[in-house]
Image (spheres, rainbow, N blue to C red):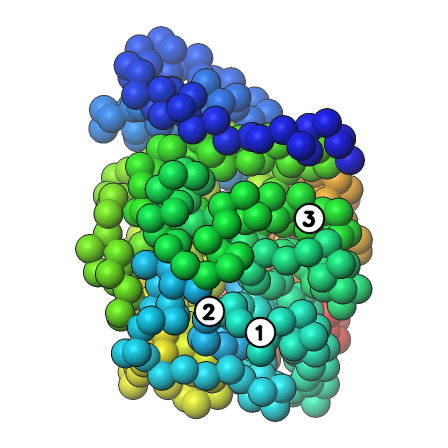
Amino acid sequence: MNIEERNKPFIDRDKLYEMINRKAPTQSELNDILNKALKLKGLNLEEVASLLRVEDEKQIQQIMDTAHTAKLAIYGKRLVLFAPIYTGNICCNNCTYCSFRKDNHLIDRKILNMEEIEHEVSALLLQGHKRVLLICGENNKNGTDYMCEAIRRTYGVREMNGKAYVRRINVELAPMEVEDFARLHAEKIGTYVCFQETYDPILYKRFHPAGTPKADYEYRVTVMDRAQEGGINDIGIGALLGLIDYRFEVLAMMEHAHHLEKCFGCGPHTVSVPRMEPAVGAPDAEHVPNPVSDKDFKKLVSIIRIALPYTGMILSTREGSKMRNELINYGISQISAGSRTNPGAYSENTYGEHKDESGSQFSLGDHREMEEVINTFIDEGYIPSFCTGCYRKGRVGNDFMDLAKPGLIKQYCLPNAMFTFREYLEDFASPNTKERGIALIKKMMAEYDQKQLIPKIEENLTKIGGGERDLYF
Ligand code: SF4
Ligand code: SF4
């Protein structure tokens, strides 16, 4: 760890606002930046600020086309799927944009006990999920002891005669101390996720009027440093888009990523792009202070993709199906499917047509069931992936980036996507989806350029067809 860098503040508010308010780049400047982006080495802060200032429709399309090329070059046509499990919606904070805020008396409150968490896990396993994100409001009933137990119980659930189990747990939890991160690390979590909400230190106070430590900007903005010190190499950052000018947030996330690279030699594993949705009893979600238009949203996703080419980008079910289907072409590499954001919703069978969102954190934009989501990705030629290979093989943090930066990670992603998708098709899909999915895998195999790996991939696919599970590179 670079201690000197660790202690330097990394968000210079005035500088970032000055950068977003300059003139848009000329066509020639834009071309230079996008040509550099195609080398897949990322962009610096000045270049990202220039792209954020572009407003011309044709030039935005040029940025999106570049992001599309970059995404295919790095990830190929695979899309990782996961599901969140909300373990509780009782919260001691009062964030003005969230239904879980303590002063909101309009939602039902609940913290799941361990048996209830296991029921949620079972319900998701029976949909075909393998990767879950544990997430909850902040209060003294679900601190580190509770989460460690929840992680153990989640990993312990077995379905389908022991063939279906959670292979990776990521967590989205409030900031904590280094010792608590060390405990989570010992429980073998994958990525630790925490959104800054807004990186503007002044406006942060407006949206977080109460609650300790949530109201403490400094404590939150330094959380990833403590996570790294606690041994967690894969971390996920994000900002809640709609609170302030999205261009400031994107630049600040770049600064955060650069800070982590300088201090720990490795930037974030993922960036999330949650756009504000209506939320019951949350005044700033009912009247979003700085709404991000669809046009700007596509632009910012494309810019993040080319600025941080090796960082996964996550989109939740906040967005509607049309936007989600579009954004997978421009940068999104992970997506939640069949999600519910109220504790206990999967096992209470409030899924599908009969939706009951009481107790939810926000309104969902995409209510589709898992198989329907999967079918739209098949239509787009994307292999839905439940891969957890890197985490299981220890390719995390710097080891992951050493493979990702020379463009080698795709060698693992596509075969692992085919293996996990084939498992899904065998165990959970309807006959029609199975037929379409197998045809897509065959097409992928025909186009796959790492010819030396084909015999091993075919061998594994045959084994999966014969009943073996959990094969990965
Ligand atoms: S955003 Fe998080 S901390 Fe704030 S009220 Fe909601 S659950 Fe609590
Ligand atoms: S191979 Fe690694 S980077 Fe690729 S999908 Fe699997 S876990 Fe993610």
- Check whether the beta carbons of the residues at disc 1 and disc 2 lie within 8 A of each other: yes
Dot 3 amino acid type: Arg
Residue beneath the point at 73% across and 54% down: 178
Residue beneath the point at 67% across and 70% down: 144
Residue 188 coordinates in the image, percent (x, y):
75, 64
Badge 3 is on which residue?
Answer: 226
1 vs 3, front mark: 1
The tag on residue 140 is 1
- Find the distance from the CA under tag 2 to the CA under tag 3: 22 Å
- The quadrant of the picture occupied by the C terminus is bottom right
- Find the distance from the CA under tag 1 to the CA under tag 2: 8 Å
Q: Nearer the viewer, residue 371 or 95?
A: 95
Q: Earlier in the sequence, mark 2 or mark 3?
A: 2
Q: Nearer the viewer, residue 178 or 441?
A: 178
Residue 283 figure quarter: bottom left
Dot 1 amino acid type: Asn
Residue 415 figure quarter: bottom right
- Check whether the beta carbons of the residues at disc 2 and disc 3 lie within 8 A of each other: no
Residue 215 appears in the picture as rendered: yes
- Where 114 falls versus 63 (above or below)? below
- Where 251 falls versus 239 (above or below)? above
Mark 1: few/some/many CA within 10 Å (<14, 14-19, 20+): few
Confirm or reject: label 2 Cβ below 8 Å from ligand 1.
yes
The tag on residue 291 is none
Badge 2 is on which residue?
Answer: 92
Residue beneath the point at 62% across and 62% down: 170
